[in-house]
Amino acid sequence: MRLLFSLMLLAVPILGVWTFLKADEWHTWFPQNVSSFGGEIDGLFNLILYMVAFTFVVTEVCLAWFVFKYSAKRSDKGAFTHGSHKLEMIWTAIPAVALLFIAFSQMETWAKIKFQKNFPKDGAYSVEHPIAEVWASQFDWRFRYPGDDGVLGTVDDLETSFEFVVPVDTDVVFKLRSRDVIHSFFVPEFRLKQDALPGHTIPVWFRATKTGVYDLVCAELCGWGHYKMAGSVRVVSAEEFKTRMAALKAEWFSNGKEEGQ
Amino acid sequence: MRSESRSLLVAALCIVGASWSCQLDTDRPAARPVIHYSLSEATRATSPEGEPLVPLDVQANVAGSLEMLFGTPAHPQFMLLDEWKESGFDLNWPQYPKGDQGSGEFSESDLASLATDNARYFRTPLMHIEAGEYERVAIHSWSPDLQRAWAALLAETAPELRNDEFKAKAKALFVDYYPTLASSAELYRQHCLHCHGPEGGGDGPTARFLNPLPRDYRQGTFKFTAVGKGTPRRADLFRILDEGVTGTAMPSFRRFSKAQLNGLVDYVRLLSMRGMVERSLVATFAEEEALTSGDVVAAYSDVWSKWEKAAEKLLVFEGEVPHPTPESIARGRELFLDAKSANCFSCHGPEGRGNGASAFVTDPQSGEVKPAYKDDWGHDIIPRNLRYGIFRGGRRPIDLFRRIKNGIAGTPMPEAPSSLTADDIWALVHYVGTLSERPQLVHAPAHDAHDSHSTPETHGSEPAKH
Amino acid sequence: MNPVATPAAPHVHAPHVQPGEGEPGTVREHHDHHELGFLRKYVFSVDHKVIGLQFLFSGLVFLVLGGLMAMAIRYQLAWPWQPMPGLAWMFPATGGAITPEFYTMLFTMHGTIMIFFVMIPLLTGAFGNFLIPLMIGAPDMAFPKLNMLGYWTMIPAFFFILLGFFVEGGHAAGGWTSYPPLSTIESAAPGSLSGQTCWLMGLTWVGVSSMMGAVNYVTTIVKMRAPGLTMMRLPLSIWGLMITSLLQLFALPVLTAASIMQLLDRVLNTGFFTPTNLLVNNVTPDSFAYGAEAAAAGGQPLLWQHLFWFYSHPAVYILVLPAMGFTSDILAVHARKPIFGYKPMVYSMSAIAGLGFIVWGHHMFTSGMNPALGMTFMVSTVMIALPSAIKVFNWLGTLWGGRIHLRTPMLFACAFVSMFIIGGLSGIWMAATPVDIYIHDTYIVVAHFHYVVFAGSLFAIFAAIYHWFPKMFGRLMNETMGKIHFVGSFIFTNTTFYMMHQLGVAGLMRRTADPYAYDVYQQLQPINEFITLSAFCMFAWQIFFVANFFHSMFWGKRVGRNPWNAASLEWDAPSPPGHGNFDRELKVYRGPYEFSSPEVAEDYIPQTRAL
């Protein structure tokens, strides 16, 4: 019996590590990364993963081993000890250093992504001149691009639903707003998530590195239609971006003729 | 003690085993959910004495006729009229040309754009096919026809015989996909029915929590179209599915492919025609006290002809859409406030806040302010607050132009009076468009009314940047 | 008071106990014999043991309810929009598939019930009540009537939380966190109609009950310890419960204030949490009349998040600290070894509680809160892993060199350690701000807190039930059945929750009724099916526990005072203890973990034995 229970406890780290090793094969690992800072986030995740995995395996194996070894029938008494000051010092100091290391290793990336003073300033888009205003509402995404005047909130703004078109390899800043409840702008492939807070205009930036169509997901519960609140981000080349904006403008000022079908 | 624990153990094992086997049972695809079409409340209405207004045998007759014409939720289909059969016209297959057992509603370029969009929608399965990882291709439960076709394709070619030809065939299956009506009905059941109801009556379980209520298709009236107060075109319904209706609970469904959305349009049309035929049959009965099979066929072909001719009423503006100028905005404001011409303010209020005097009545007893109008579906309706900048039928100038020119079907919003010229309507479009925007929107000299308005959207956010 | 009082009268520590209160005790010959009616004995009882059992039974009933909801959630996630077995009759229009608003209600109420109506009442209400007086050698709680009131204020809570299921629109559907404006604006969600009001009322009553309990526990532990029982001789269960009560005393008022503010927002339009100019479901929430311009609400949705997490993060420790205490006690008893590093254990529990107050912001890294604040919260959150790590190492140290008896409570306690390691370690990802940008609100969070609360605390509760069952009912639970229960629960718990880590890494978000329409999540359905089948098995497996529990209650093997040869005070009382608990005078000479001491021939020295 004690063998069975120890094996069960031992199976936790073995199968646990195994499922992570198989994750790629089962397609339960990160989706591809297509943003400039996504790689850093994955790297930090993996850094923690390795440290955590080491601790996990060591402690779980110890646990299983102790349970197996010391549950054997024995005639003598167990060891009589109330602890060891030295050991306590060791296993306080080492994790403390490791944890502080983890905390401080995160700060640079966090500051880079979220601190407004680190937002892109020199490119085509900045906090003052965002590429678009992203409106979240129950249960859709709307994207307002500035019109010819380059200013948002004016009558010549162009509005699209569902699909956010952005140029590739460009620092893109947009403003995130919500009309009703809290939503969250989440693009798994960008490793980017930011809540849209009603009453606030929150600037967000990213830089997509690969063209393609990526799912935009609402990640904060926003009502019964939360799962319906789908969108997509279409990353296109700079030229195609221009073409698409021109097409959007033409569609905006259409006289309704081409809809004949 | 020992025997007791053993018998307990056996009993518990039996229970666990039984429940386990029940659960494992669910591993195979669940049985197809059963839903039914029922007749509308109007048809089933009873007099105060409890007598059905339409006799039960006539109700049964209507229900049977509708099932003959439109099938059931599991097998929806359009019945083919004799002349359709002769001419090779088949409403069930819109992707095939007329005369070739199809209804020919798509041009070659339309079909090409459906294929392009299928390539986007099925990008992951196509990627797996390209890589030869056929077992990784997963197909959603709302495409049972595609699931069957894919399973059949895999079954007919052994894994070692899957060459490039097979690959091309596999890709074509996805790229050329157009759902059958039954598949569209399943997609509708999973994603639309909980609001719009099994018959498209706008009465699904979620509907009562929504404001505005989901569309009731059964009268054939759809508000936001390019064709005025008539039956909508395919493109009008498609646009609603594709873009959603902003400011309502209707989201954009562009995450499905264009082919699937067109399939949904087919199914919505079926439900809408079913409702229209039902109303027409009940009306015929009320007039003639009898229903013949001729009436049924006549109602069916009459309803179809309405849908067929929808495109004829398409409203387009000949020429280039004018851009707003300070003058056009000022002119729009004048018209907006002019009781003799456009008279917008009487409902929408002098400031466009949707609080115009004529849209509300005051209950003389309680003093309660209530909406004065009802829409065609019998619900209270209030005018749009134009200052929210939420225009359900679209915010493009041409959309606003259509709303003003054609009015909104099913609502008290009237067609524009003939005294208004196209230029007048554009002036109104420009003025209405500015109501929700920041004051310096058209870089206009600050001489007209809108410069003093703070707007709902920018209130409380960062100051305007010049 | 005591007609047959002898010089060794039992009630020397109980001058305040009124005659006629509580049950007279069945195993004791020296007590008065006037029988109380059933109502006074089992329903309106002031006896801490009966109240503890009341909490235990109501907690277990709600556990079944919450579990059934979890099964429904899992069914939807594995086979979205297919007819739901058992619930199909409620949804004829959709062919038996649940509606999305029903799904939002399911996960909201699953979370609410499991946290506020199962785990907190079981850990603090049931075991706090049952164990505290027994383990500190007191005849009852300091305030027995307050204690009774503590359970009876749960009755309105039960009423409101069950009422919510039957109101128009269904129960609250804003998530167990109830973020406004979704939860405050009636038009925002069906569950925000009346369900949310019921939810708030229920929670407020739970808060009142917990508050009464906490006051009582702290007073009892501080004032009513047996002579010689210094604070540093307390069993770790008592330390855990004491620190938990302190957490509740300081954090709970904030939640109560917040829920009252939300209630006011809902019924009086006060607008604490509602910003200006919202348009929700075509209604401007802060205006009363048609077409009226929005009045200035000027509220802040983030304020609720701060207030809520200021309580609810400490509440996470409320959910685990007592469990840590029980585990420590059970490990020591069944490993026949003194607890390794008693003082570091106490200090680390206190450190967890202290740090627990300054980490709440880690729930809000992506909420739009000032990112600089995020950085400070990250450091405090990462550091809270340190005392948790110390505790794990000390538990391993306790096992090392012991003479382990692998009885059912010991197995569950070892499983707690094993599962807590997983739950604790995965928390580090969540603390790391940049990583949290990606994994916030994904299934990795779900995996994390289920490993801590389900696989951790609930396993500790199972361990505690198996361990203290003889004290509760004077009978042992069946060991074979217990072991079967353990094996299945352990395996299926891990198969259910472990793969959720990978789902989270793949980016799958929580609270999504149908994730598979997204291209990026489509390939995750097989994993979800596997998880769902595991969850069904795990739920079904609990039949072994239920059968064993009720069978042993009536027909289990009778045992004496101290079946495990444990050293702490509760085992000095009869099993089950009568009213007033102890039938002999107590004097404490040492700590509760004197096992395998070379000083005596037996392998344990009871706390009351003078050498």
Image (cartoon, coloured by chain):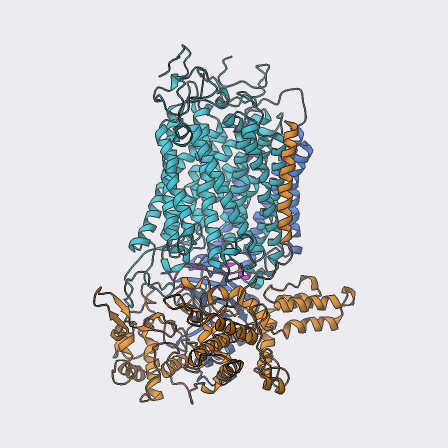
Chain colours: A blue, B orange, C cyan
Q: Is residue A16 visible?
A: no
- Side of B455 where A191 appears, left or right: right
> At which x and y percent is residue B263?
56, 74
**In front: A28, or B240?**
B240
What residue lies at 31% left-to-right and 53% top-to-bottom?
C267
**In front: C49, or B397?**
C49
What residue lies at 66% left-to-right and 64% top-to-bottom?
B137
- Quadrant where the C terminus of chain B lies? bottom left
- Side of B130 where C21 appears, left or right: left
- Side of B228 where C339 appears, left or right: right
- As for residue A186 lying within the magenta part, the answer is yes
Vertical relation: B382 (above or below) C417 = below
- As for residue B115 lying within the magenta part, the answer is no
Query: For residue B349, what is the image quadrant?
Result: bottom left
Q: Is residue C120 visible?
A: yes
Most distant residue in the top direction:
C7
**In front: C198, or B426?**
C198
**In front: B13, or C261?**
B13
> At which x and y percent is residue B1?
63, 27
Q: Which residues are magenta?
A: A177-192
